[in-house]
Image: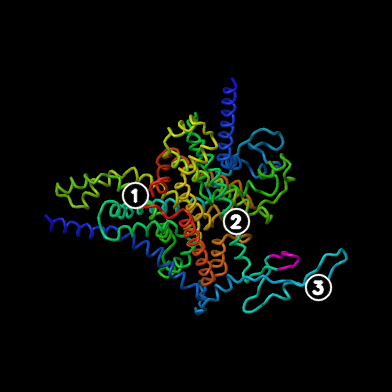
């Protein structure tokens, strides 16, 4: 009987923890949605309410005006477009260039392989801020405009990671596949793009997603390179420097609506690809 | 046969070179070359977007950035309450070649000292960044471990929990900074002041982001929320490699929960934990978005200070010196971790 009681007790503790953690992770986003549905007057109500309510009657009233404002805000729409261009370009280029390197590192025999691997691994620890002034000087000297500059510079953190994860994936593919192709008269490069590359599709989805999210979220380079070219600003920069169309002070209602708009696509991606994402995130740590 | 294999190997060598070339060209132009140029710029007085001639200034930037001084202050008088009044640091701190400015005053063995630096803002940013790094990484690790231990259990709703867990991680830092900025609002329009009042911690008017004593803590709170999921995922991956049977065996042998955790679980996830710690520490040391968005020029991290010197003050040379110092600090941490963990194990 006693044993049963303690089992129930520990079960209750367990569930309290689960519920607590769930609220901890989700609450800030809930609060964002809540804020985004409030009008400017409702925003200034004290104490803040947990759902948008009318300040006289106390009834729940939702307003979509912040969303309307966000979708007619040219800076934000332009930011979405820029972010999409940058993140997609980075992802695609990174996968192409990265899979070349990963194939060489994972499947070919050559001198200096270990050195190359470690060099690339060391790059994942490179602080962005330490190359900022140098990179900015290069970009200014050659008059590279902001969008290509961002695409190019984002390889700093997406490429090493992509190569690292893809290499370990290539290593896991059986050598016999390449040998068989070789016997059939295929060159190494043919066996790479006709046989091995299609097999790496799962790893490509994972690393591609992570590269996309990293590029979508990047702030330092985007802020610096677009400081004199405002039309090229990406979403994070637009969010950070948001000036509203409705409110005169800091337009938190609109900022929160923009936050929801930016986050929902990412959440959908996460929901669909959660297993793949988790594999990718942990691959570097466990296999490395 | 032998010659064929030989030529095949040579072929592979050549092909590997061509395949790796694009990656290395890119990484050279965006990482190694800029790093080198930052290093050489750090010895000059180069200004950004200016026609002023760039001159070599030797170690001057570093001297200004890093000069610290602890000076003893003499008592000059006593006020009516018996409190000793010390001389004003401004009168005694050196002014050449750079002026020393006070950071803080403190007492050791009834002697009164002043701690000063030629660039107090940078020294404070280093201190704040280190505090931020140590505390947030420690909290993330503990919380991440707890989350991981819960998430490896089978319970209904686990899938939903996993998605919930990825929410903070996926939201761009620029976005979550704004979200938390709003939650930390200094009146009761902010949820923390509402809750603070419920529990009697604040009067509902606490300026979380303006009060120097809570500024860094607010940054830590945001960072812990955002990166605990990442930590938990890594630890989970480590936990999943532990065979279940050993726990049953331990239970039969009378080894209880806590002992199982410290004697079995911890040593077995140690390697994963070290990798996770390295990732997170290096990430936290270069923190930029959070400080830049929430504080701008009110309080700096090392990276946001370097950015401020480059973009707002246009001091390219000085900013470069800051970047080099940041790079060296991060490098120091890498060496420290590899020493402690006994070297990176091979593949």
Q: Which residue is mark 3?
A: B76
Q: Tell me whether marks 3 and 2 sit on the same chain.
A: yes
Circle 1 sits in a helix, a strand or a loop, which is it?
helix
Identified at 67% across, 51% down, the residue is B208
Q: State the image quarter where residue A97 is shown.
A: bottom left
Q: Which residue is mark 2?
A: B131
Percent position (x, y) of residue A178? 21, 47
What stretch of residues is rendered in magenta? B104-113
Percent position (x, y) of residue A157? 42, 56
Q: Is residue B285 visible?
A: yes
Identified at 53% across, 37% down, the residue is B259
Instruction: Say which of A84 and B226 sits in front.
Output: B226
Circle 2 sits in a helix, a strand or a loop, which is it?
helix
Q: Is residue B53 magenta?
A: no
Q: State the image quarter where residue B306 is shown.
A: bottom right
Q: Tag on residue A166?
A: 1
Instruction: Using the image, determine if residue A25 lies above or below residue A79.
Output: above
């Amino acid at each position: 009987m006693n044993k049963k009681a303690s089992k129930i007790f520990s079960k209750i503790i367990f569930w309290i923890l689960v519920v607590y953690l769930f609220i901890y992770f989700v609450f800030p986003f809930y609060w964002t949605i809540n804020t985004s549905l409030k009008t400017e007057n409702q925003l200034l109500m004290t104490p803040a309410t947990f759902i948008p309510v009318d300040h006289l009657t106390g009834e729940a009233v939702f307003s979509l005006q912040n969303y309307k404002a966000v979708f007619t805000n040219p800076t934000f729409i332009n930011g979405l477009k820029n972010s999409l261009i940058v993140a997609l370009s980075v992802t695609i280029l990174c996968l192409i260039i990265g899979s070349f390197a990963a194939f060489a590192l994972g499947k070919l025999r050559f001198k200096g392989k270990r050195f190359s691997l470690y060099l690339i691994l060391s790059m994942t620890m490179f602080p962005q801020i330490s190359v900022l002034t140098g990179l900015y000087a290069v970009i200014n000297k050659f008059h590279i405009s902001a969008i290509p500059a961002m695409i190019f510079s984002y390889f700093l953190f997406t490429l090493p990671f992509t190569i690292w994860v893809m290499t370990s994936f290539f290593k896991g593919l059986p050598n016999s596949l390449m040998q068989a192709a070789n016997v059939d008269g295929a060159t190494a490069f043919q066996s790479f793009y006709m046989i091995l590359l299609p097999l790496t599709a799962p790893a490509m989805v994972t690393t591609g997603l992570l590269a996309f999210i990293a590029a979508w979220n990047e702030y330092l380079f985007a802020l610096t390179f677009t400081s004199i070219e405002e039309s090229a600003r990406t979403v994070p920069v637009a969010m950070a420097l948001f000036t509203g169309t409705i409110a005169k002070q800091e337009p938190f209602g609109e900022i929160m609506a923009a936050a929801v708009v930016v986050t929902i696509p990412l959440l959908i991606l996460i929901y669909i690809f959660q297993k793949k994402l988790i594999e990718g995130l942990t691959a570097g740590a466990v296999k490395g | 046969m032998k010659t064929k294999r030989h030529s095949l190997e040579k072929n592979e060598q050549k092909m590997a070179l061509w395949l790796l070339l694009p990656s290395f060209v890119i990484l050279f132009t965006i990482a190694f070359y800029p790093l080198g140029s930052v290093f050489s710029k750090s010895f000059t007085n180069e200004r950004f977007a200016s026609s002023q001639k760039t001159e070599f200034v030797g170690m001057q930037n570093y001297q200004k950035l890093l000069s610290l001084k602890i000076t003893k202050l003499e008592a000059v008088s006593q006020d009516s309450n018996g409190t000793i009044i010390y001389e004003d640091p401004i009168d005694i701190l050196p002014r050449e070649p750079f002026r020393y400015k006070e950071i803080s005053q403190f007492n050791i063995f009834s002697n009164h000292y002043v701690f000063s630096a030629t660039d107090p803002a940078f020294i404070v940013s280093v201190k704040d960044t280190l505090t931020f790094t140590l505390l947030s990484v420690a909290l993330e690790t503990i919380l991440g471990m707890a989350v991981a231990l819960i998430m490896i259990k089978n319970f209904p709703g686990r899938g939903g929990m996993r998605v919930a867990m990825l929410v903070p991680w996926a939201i761009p830092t620029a976005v979550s900074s704004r979200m938390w900025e709003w939650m930390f609002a200094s009146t009761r329009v902010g949820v923390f002041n509402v809750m603070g009042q419920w529990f009697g911690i604040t009067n509902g008017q606490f300026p979380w982001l303006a009060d120097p004593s809570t500024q860094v803590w607010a940054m830590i709170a945001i960072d812990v929320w955002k990166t605990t999921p990442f930590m938990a995922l890594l630890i989970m991956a480590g936990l999943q490699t532990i065979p279940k049977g050993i726990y049953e065996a331990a239970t039969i042998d009378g080894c209880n929960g806590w002992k199982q955790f410290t004697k079995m679980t911890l040593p077995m996830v140690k390697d994963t934990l070290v990798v996770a710690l390295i990732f997170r520490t290096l990430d936290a040391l270069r923190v930029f978005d959070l400080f830049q968005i929430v504080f701008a020029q009110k309080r700096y991290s090392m990276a946001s200070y370097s950015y401020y010197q480059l973009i707002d003050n246009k001091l390219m040379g000085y900013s470069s010196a800051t970047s080099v110092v940041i790079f060296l600090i991060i490098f120091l941490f890498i060496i420290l971790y590899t020493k402690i963990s006994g070297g990176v194990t091979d593949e």
